[in-house]
Image (cartoon, rainbow, N blue to C red):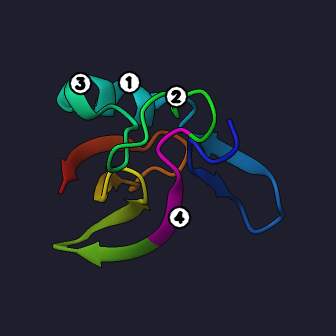
């Protein structure tokens, strides 16, 4: 999926999770009119996707989270990663 997902890798270098096309599905549902538009460049969904470009992992109130910054949507995907094999989507903030 390239610049369309995020992955979690264990200390041995094995991929234990990949979000696949979740970002696209969530953004299409929440921002249908601007889906992958990124500020006026229509017809880019098949070229670039949402372009995740930054990630921060942190602990808050005893839970582990990942914030994944999306360039084209100017927002952040929030995932609970308490179980790195089965993260779950929490919210999208813009």
Where is residue 2 shown, x and y percent of the image?
70, 43
Q: Range of the magenta residues?
A: 49-55
> Mark 3 = which residue?
32
Q: Which residue corresponds to the image point at 21% horizontal and 27% vertical from the top-left?
A: 33
Residue 72 vs residue 52: left or right?
Answer: left
- Residue that label 4 marks: 53
Reading the image, the residue beneath label 1 is 25
Q: As rendered, which of 28 and 62 lies closer to the eye?
A: 28
Looking at marks 3 and 2 on the same chain, the residue that comes earlier in the sequence is marked by 2
Q: Is residue 88 left or right of residue 63?
A: right
Q: Nearer the viewer, mark 3 or mark 4?
A: 3
Percent from the top left, x then y, of residue 57?
42, 73
| Residues under numbered marks 1 and 2 in contact, where contact means CB atoms less than 8 Å apart | yes
Give the labeled residue for mark 2.
Answer: 21
Residue for point 38% across, 24% down: 25
Q: Mark 1 or mark 3: which comes first in sequence?
A: 1
Q: Residues within 10 Å of mark 1 (few under 14, many from 20)?
A: few
Where residue 5 sits, quadrant-wise, is top right
For mark 2, does the 10 Å Cα neighbourhood hold few (<14), some (14 to 19), or many (20 or more) residues? few
Judge whether residue 35 is colored magenta: no
Instruction: Assess disc 4: are there few (<14), some (14-19) or many (≥20) residues with their C-alpha within 10 Å of its C-alpha.
Output: some
As for residue 52 lying within the magenta part, the answer is yes
Quadrant location, the C terminus: bottom left
Q: Is residue 76 left or right of residue 47?
A: left
Mark 3 residue crowding within 10 angstroms, few (<14) / some (14–19) / many (20+):
few
| SS at circle 2 | loop
Instruction: Say which element carries label 4.
Output: strand
Quadrant in the picture for the N terminus: top right
Circles 4 and 1: CB distance less than 8 Å?
A: no
């Amino acid at each position: 999926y390239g610049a369309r997902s995020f992955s979690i890798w264990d200390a041995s270098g094995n991929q234990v999770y990949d979000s696949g096309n979740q970002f696209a599905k969530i953004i299409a549902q929440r921002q249908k009119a601007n889906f992958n538009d990124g500020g006026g460049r229509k017809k880019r969904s098949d070229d670039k996707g949402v372009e995740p470009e930054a990630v921060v992992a942190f602990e808050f109130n005893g839970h582990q989270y990942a914030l994944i910054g999306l360039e084209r949507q100017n927002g952040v995907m929030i995932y609970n990663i308490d179980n790195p094999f089965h993260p779950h989507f929490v919210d999208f903030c813009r």
